[in-house]
Image: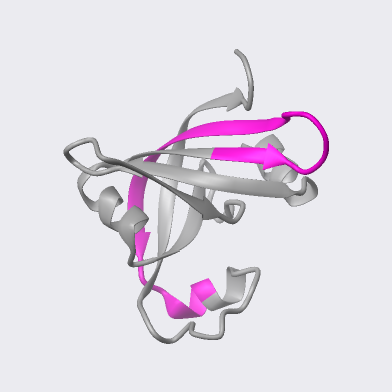
Amino acid sequence: MKDLQEYFENTKGFGVLATADSSGKVDAAVYSKPHFLEAGTLTFIMRDRLTHHNLQSNPSATFLFCEEGQGYKGKRLYLIKSREENNPELISKIKRRKYTDENEEPVFLVYFTLEKERPLIGA
């Protein structure tokens, strides 16, 4: 997992987090790179919107990361939600950017275990 943490710390690009509800209806949303807070886990900061709602009934998610530049390089991470917390102090400490409306709705720190890692294309 250390290699993965270094990859995200040193690679520019954008990510999409895909989730599905309990009936299988899929959603995909643009997300920042994951945070690595504990050994064996990665986290995303999320507002109480559709992605967060889907994870309440279906803990599976996929994070697709496309590296900046020409071609199609990146990673696909297959994830299982392990837990979440509403910890405004920790979230404020680790978030990478500020929002103008950040106090308007609840924000959660959602923890995942990595089930499988694949390149963006192939394998």
Please give the name of the residue rendered at 56% of the width and 38% of the height, measured from the top-left corner: 64
Q: Which residues are magenta?
A: 64-91
Exactly how many numbered labels are in the figure? 0
Q: From the viewer's perspective, is residue 27 above or below residue 122?
A: below
Please give the name of the residue rendered at 67% of the width and 44% of the height, measured from the top-left corner: 5
Residue 21: x, y in percent?
A: 24, 44
Q: Is residue 2 visible?
A: no
Q: Is residue 41 visible?
A: yes
Please give the name of the residue rendered at 51% of the width and 72% of the height, measured from the top-left corner: 91
Identify the residue at the far left of this view: 23
In this picture, residue 40 sits left or right of residue 27: right
Please give the name of the residue rendered at 58% of the width and 55% of the height, measured from the top-left corner: 35
Q: From the viewer's perspective, is residue 80 above or below residue 35?
A: above
Indicate whether residue 84 is drawn in magenta. yes
Residue 74: x, y in percent?
A: 68, 33
Residue 67: x, y in percent?
A: 73, 40
Displayed quadrant of residue 60: top left
Say which quadrant the N terminus sits in. Answer: top right
